[in-house]
Image (cartoon, rainbow, N blue to C red):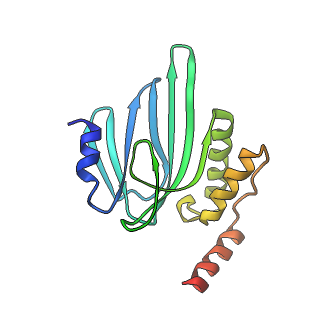
Amino acid sequence: MRASNALRQLADDGLTHVELTWIEKRIEHWIRFGRVENDRIVDRRRRIVSFRPGVVFAFVRWAANDYGTIMSRIDVVRAVAAEEPFTTLPFVRPGGEILLSIQGWPKVSKVLAAIDAADEAGVDPCDAAPDHWRHVHNRIAAGLEPRAYTLERHQAWLKRVKVEG
């Protein structure tokens, strides 16, 4: 079964589905972080991972040809519930709330460094404040360094969620 057909069949289950492809040195799609609800193997090169509504995940896409890298991109996305508005994104069904969208390897590597910094601070990146990923997007897009996500920032985010609760 083709991955796109499999995605269409899964579209009505309330989850967000992401098609991952791995053709070594040609096309590589992977999840950098996020709590996967379901992982379905389509064939030896493709699989579909699914996320519950509200889960934040990072989707990395990279492609190359005989002359080198032709595309690199990272998107940090929040999976949405059925009644929520969303933005479409290639290989993501139905789509999601895009918190960060960066292209070009130098910028993508800065986002990966920001993800690593959150990990090193002891915070799972999928639990970080969505505003942090918007901040990282805006700073990198403007050619600036993003502020690190610290444990103190995370605790402030958790208090804000509790108050808004």
Is residue 114 positioned above or below 23 on the image?
below
**Foreground pick, 37 / 76:** 76
Q: Position of residue 26 (x, y in %)?
A: 45, 24
Q: Residue at x 63, y 51 (%)?
A: 116
The residue under the point 69% across, 53% down is 136
Could you say where residue 78 lies in the image, as x and y percent from the top left? 49, 60
Quadrant of res 148: bottom right
Q: Quadrant of the N terminus?
A: top left
Number of numbered tags placed on the structure image: 0
| 48 or 152: nearer the viewer | 48
Quarter where residue 28 is shown? top left
Query: For this view, does 74 lie left or right of residue 155?
Result: left
Q: Residue furthest top?
A: 66
- 68 over 8 or under it: above or below: above
Question: Looking at the picture, does residue 143 appear above or below residue 161?
Answer: above
Q: Is residue 110 above or below residue 131?
A: above
Residue closest to the far right: 144
| Quadrant into which the C terminus falls | bottom right
**Apparent side of residue 49 relative to residue 106 in the rendered image (left or right):** left
Residue at 57%, 33% (x, y): give it: 72
Point 50% across, 28% down: residue? 63
Relative to 127, 153 lies left or right:
right
| Residue 71 in the image, given as x and y percentages of width and height | 55, 29
Residue 121 on image: x %, y %:
66, 61
Foreground: 119 or 66? 66
Q: Nearer the viewer, residue 114 or 19?
A: 19
